[in-house]
Image: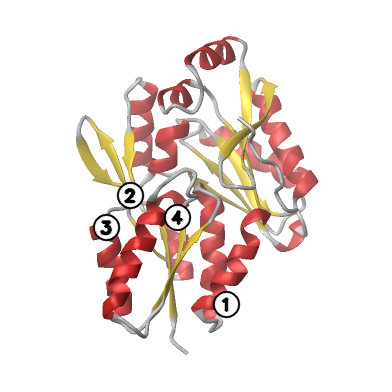
Amino acid sequence: MRKVKIITDSCADLTGELLDRYDIDYVKMSTVYEGVASPALLTWTYEEAHALYNLIRDGKRITTAQVSVEEFTAVFTKYLDMGMDIVYVACSQKQSGSVNTGFVTAKKILENYPDAKIICIDSLNATIGEGMLAMEAAKMAADGMGADEIAEKIMGMRNNVLEFFTVHSLDTLRRSGRVSASSAFFGNLFGVKPILVADAIGNQAAYKKVKGRGPAIKECINLLKENIIDPENQTIYLWHSDCDMEEVREVEAMLREAIPCKDVYIGLVGPIVGASVGPSVIGFWAFGKEVTFVNEG
């Protein structure tokens, strides 16, 4: 049986340490600022993240670009030339067209590799929720599973990824077109903090609204506690976009007190998702009950 390489993309928000630990590679999207495109690296430093989020705090618009055909071709052929099959765990199709570009590119490439497989999976998730699925796929690959079996199992897990996060300000969501200008104005005026989730079909959607940051964070933890399964045997991922680390540690303590989990892993929301949601986001990801909520908006 051919070995399998797990590939994800810049939306997965895996840290450099997690990429190395699970032997995962990724195809790079791009951020665009003042007409200059830069690769969206998951191995960025806190200083680099702080610089990007400060631009957003200053009202600058950061746009993004999906994975290019050239990037897919370079990464896919690298591993096909090593005699490996590929499972690409992609950002939700509702949030990026990269999975579709990957599928079309893979089909073309495979004309020259008739014995190989490239399977592109819409994860129905983004940020570390997508990354969690990539890590599970990598564990399966390390255990010797083939590409078809890995893909089937990951497809069956997509709606068991729990995501509950809240934003500090609605301004970046307004600039990225996620909320209307009037909603952002009145939401900021009255201190309304939406709790966002990955819904059952891959949207990042507002699940409920809470007044005040502290209560919103507590509600995220409560929702996670209600829906997580077997927390004692899994890691909860606490991801943030350049929050004050004192706040992050306080939130970690609240989380550990509320949910007796195996561990808490802290990381940064990456440049692609960060450009849409803005600075000072804080949220929680784990596996749990099946997600059935669908955004009707």
**How packed is label 2: few (under 14 Cα within 10 Å), some, or many (20 or more)?**
many
Earlier in the chain: of badge 4 and badge 1, it is 4
Position of residue 204 in the picture relative to residue 16 (left or right): right
Q: Which mark is residue 149?
A: 1
Earlier in the chain: of badge 2 and badge 4, it is 4
**How packed is label 3: few (under 14 Cα within 10 Å), some, or many (20 or more)?**
some
- In the picture, the quarter occupied by the C terminus is top right
Mark nearer the viewer, 2 or 4: 2
Mark nearer the viewer, 4 or 1: 1
Q: Amino acid at mark 1?
A: Glu
Earlier in the chain: of badge 1 and badge 3, it is 3
**How packed is label 4: few (under 14 Cα within 10 Å), some, or many (20 or more)?**
many
Position of residue 205 in the picture relative to residue 33 (left or right): right
Earlier in the chain: of badge 2 and badge 3, it is 2
Q: Name the residue at 42% across, 44% down.
A: 270
Return the residue at label 3. Answer: 69
Q: Which mark is residue 29?
A: 2
Q: Name the residue at 23% across, 59% down.
A: 70
Return the residue at label 4. Answer: 15
**How packed is label 1: few (under 14 Cα within 10 Å), some, or many (20 or more)?**
few
Residue 138 x, y percent position in the rendering? 51, 71
- As drawn, which residue projects farthest toward the right? 226
Marks 1/3: CA distance? Answer: 26 Å
Name the element at disc 4: loop
Name the element at disc 2: loop
Residue 61 seen in render: yes
Earlier in the chain: of badge 3 and badge 4, it is 4
Name the element at disc 3: helix
Earlier in the chain: of badge 1 and badge 2, it is 2
Callout 1–callout 3 Cβ contact below 8 Å: no
